[in-house]
């Protein structure tokens, strides 16, 4: 049976609208995409976890079907938009926030500004540390390229890093679809997100103080945020679980959806037992 998906569009106080897709019913699982992607990377979670939760996958401000007026100035702006989304939908009970890569950075900011809205955190292929000086400088260089019309340069730079080696061969259509999403991203939005990520604080000191249980998922072949780094973060975090996803790179939810969904389903069940 095909899982029915429902589209959402929410006006933002800052201007513009936030678009999202949702499926299922029950406790809320908020799935937040990475850079520079959109909600479509969560397709298998929308369809595969709808029997266990109300799965909501937004397009962050300026990405996908969301408008970006004005662009974000910090990751806190993205987090505040998500609080508005939950308020608009009448979701006042705590949610499970699931973020991949940049979505994980936003999860830390969400926990900082709206800890009482959290029931659980799922960190996918992300890191707690701030950018190194080299990484920050590279993001600023990319901003200048993007502002000269170079979104394709960002897509080209990321293309070979996102997936496990076998994924490029066995799931070539998914790789191409992901590249097309990146190519259609708004340049102004991409530049603003790069600057926001470069300026984000180090969340490592906050790991021991996270307000809820957490699940850490990482592809075994993730070269951007290695599994060893994510496992170390999980070990610094109280009430946490770490699961390594075999045969996946940085895009584990797309590459190995069955394994990712199984881990999230178990985490949701563990929260229900508390």
Image (cartoon, rainbow, N blue to C red):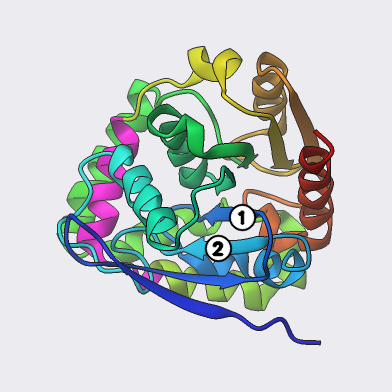
* SS at mark 1 in the image: strand
Above or below — where is 12 with respect to 22? above
Q: Of 61 and 52, which appears nearest the observer? A: 52
Q: Mark 1 or 2 closer to N-term? A: 1
What numbered label is drawn on residue 28? 1
Above or below — where is 79 with respect to 56? above
Are the residues at dot 1 and dot 2 in contact (C-beta closer than 8 Å)?
yes
Q: Quadrant of the C terminus?
A: top right
Q: Of 190 and 212, which appears nearest the observer? A: 212
Residue 161 as seen in the image, left or right of residue 53? left
Type of secondary structure dominating the magenta stretch: helix
User: Which corner quadrant of the image does residue 168 belong to?
Assistant: bottom right
In this rendering, does residue 178 appear at all?
A: no
Say few, some or many: other residues with alpha carbon within 10 Å of mark 2 (under 14 / 14 to 19 / 20 or more). Answer: many
**Residue at (74, 52) in percent of width and height:** 248
Magenta stretch bounds: 183-199
What numbered label is drawn on residue 56? 2
């Amino acid at each position: 049976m095909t899982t029915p998906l429902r589209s959402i569009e929410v006006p933002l106080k800052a201007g513009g609208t936030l678009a999202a897709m949702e499926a299922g019913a029950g406790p809320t699982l908020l799935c937040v995409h990475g850079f520079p992607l959109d909600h479509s990377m969560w397709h298998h979670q929308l369809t595969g976890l709808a029997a266990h939760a109300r799965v909501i996958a937004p397009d962050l401000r300026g990405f996908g079907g969301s408008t970006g007026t004005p662009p974000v100035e910090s990751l806190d702006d993205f987090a505040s938009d998500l609080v508005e989304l939950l308020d608009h939908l009448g979701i006042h009970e705590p949610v499970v926030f699931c973020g991949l890569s940049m979505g994980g950075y936003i999860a830390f900011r969400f926990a900082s500004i709206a800890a009482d809205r959290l029931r659980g955190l799922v960190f996918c292929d992300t890191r707690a540390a701030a950018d190194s000086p080299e990484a920050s400088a590279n993001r600023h260089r990319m901003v200048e390229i993007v502002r000269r019309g170079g979104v394709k340069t960002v897509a080209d730079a990321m293309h070979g890093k996102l997936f496990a080696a076998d994924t490029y061969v066995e799931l070539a259509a998914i790789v191409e679809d992901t590249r097309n999403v990146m190519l259609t991203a708004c340049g102004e939005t991409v530049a603003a997100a790069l600057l926001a990520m470069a300026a984000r604080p180090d969340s490592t000191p906050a790991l021991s103080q996270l307000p809820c249980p957490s699940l850490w998922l990482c592809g075994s072949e993730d070269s951007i945020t290695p599994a060893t780094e994510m496992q170390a973060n999980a070990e610094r975090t109280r009430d946490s679980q770490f699961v390594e996803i075999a045969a996946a790179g940085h895009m584990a939810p797309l590459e190995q959806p069955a394994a990712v969904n199984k881990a999230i389903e178990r985490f949701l069940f563990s929260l229900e037992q508390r």
